[in-house]
């Protein structure tokens, strides 16, 4: 791990999704350099066996460390659920920040006592999800919705239009009908569908994206370790992909970065 405060923050995800986390970190910490890796060639991660997720997560982490990163953001709920314990145990000197489904704030604020979580199968099977529910949502009914088809929509760049709305509606309506007044986005791809989800849930449920909280955790960890970038130079942002898709290129261009 690179101990230099000017070193970049590394991010990885199965594809475009982690850019929703990158966006929040870049907004909160505009001086930081970043390297983002999208494993589009292996997307989706959502229903892969845990051994495969661990092997992929270790490989991407090592590549980001070789690229000189000072901290790794596991910008993928599925990879966090499956691999973050192994990453931390294997590379104890590396600061990691993972994704946590926002079940705690959702159940704290829910008036109906019902919250909906949209995520992948792998995330629901993880220890973190089970423990978060057991600790913070004991009094809450937590409805789980596996929404793997949302990942495909985002990877295709299809985040609006009639077909996307129909697919999102099919998943979201049953949660609203069951009384959910908070919808938790438990997969980093889903914030790119948030405008559609908010439109469908308008007046019935709030939509929670954990990315801003994750960005604050990145800041806390960097500050604690004296790793915040003090430089006033314009930051460098590198975006890599194991298979750069048109939708990935378009999203990177929209976020005004450079493809490496
Ligand atoms: N973006 C990822 C997540 O947060 C993975 C989605 C997938 O590849 O299935 O879970």
Image (tube, rainbow, N blue to C red):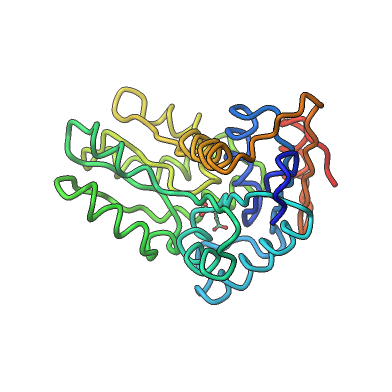
Residue 247 seen: no
On the image, the x and y values in percent for residue 159 come to: 59, 37
Residue at position x 62%, y 27% in the image: 27
- Does residue 19 show up? yes
Q: For the point 83% across and 38% down, which residue is it?
A: 258
27 or 192: which is nearer to us? 27
Q: Position of residue 145 (x, y in %)?
A: 36, 52
User: 242 left or right of 160?
Assistant: right
Image point (46%, 36%), residue name: 213
Quadrant of residue 207 in the image?
top left
Left or right, 242 with respect to 204, comes to right
Residue in the foreground of this view, choosing between 124 and 12:
12
User: Viewed as shown, does residue 169 lie left or right of 21?
Assistant: left
Position of residue 135 relative to residue 33, above or below, is below
Does 258 sit above or below residue 27? below
Assign the N terminus to one quadrant of the image: bottom right
Disc tally is: 0
Above or below, 11 against 47 in this view is: above
Relative depth, front residue between 7 and 145: 7
Residue closest to the far left: 139
Ligand 1's quadrant: bottom right
Extreme residue in the right direction: 260
- Place of residue 139 in the rendered image (x, y in percent of width and height, measured from the top left): 14, 46
The location of residue 111, given as percent across then percent down, is 18, 31
């Amino acid at each position: 791990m690179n101990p230099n405060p000017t070193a970049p923050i590394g991010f990885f995800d199965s594809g475009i999704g982690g850019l929703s986390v990158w966006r929040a970190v870049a907004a909160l910490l505009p001086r930081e350099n970043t390297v983002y890796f999208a494993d589009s060639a292996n997307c989706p991660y959502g229903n892969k066996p845990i051994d495969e997720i661990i092997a992929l997560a270790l490989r991407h982490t090592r590549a980001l460390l070789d690229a000189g990163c000072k901290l790794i953001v596991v910008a993928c709920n599925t990879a966090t659920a499956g691999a973050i314990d192994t990453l931390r145990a294997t590379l104890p000197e590396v600061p990691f920040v993972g994704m946590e489904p926002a079940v705690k704030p959702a159940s704290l604020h829910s008036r109906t006592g019902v919250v909906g979580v949209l995520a992948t199968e792998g995330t629901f099977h993880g220890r973190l999800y089970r423990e978060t529910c057991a600790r913070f949502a004991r009094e809450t009914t937590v409805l789980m919705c596996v929404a793997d088809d949302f990942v495909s929509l985002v990877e295709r760049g299809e985040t609006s239009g009639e077909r996307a709305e129909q697919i999102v509606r099919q998943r979201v309506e049953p949660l609203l009908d069951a009384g959910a007044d908070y919808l938790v986005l438990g997969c980093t791809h889903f914030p790119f569908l948030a405008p559609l989800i908010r439109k469908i849930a308008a007046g019935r449920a709030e939509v929670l994206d954990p990315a801003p909280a994750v960005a604050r955790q990145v800041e806390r960890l960097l500050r604690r370790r004296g790793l915040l970038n003090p430089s006033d130079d314009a930051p460098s942002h590198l975006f890599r992909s194991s298979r750069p898709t048109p939708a990935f290129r378009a999203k990177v261009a929209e976020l005004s970065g450079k493809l490496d």
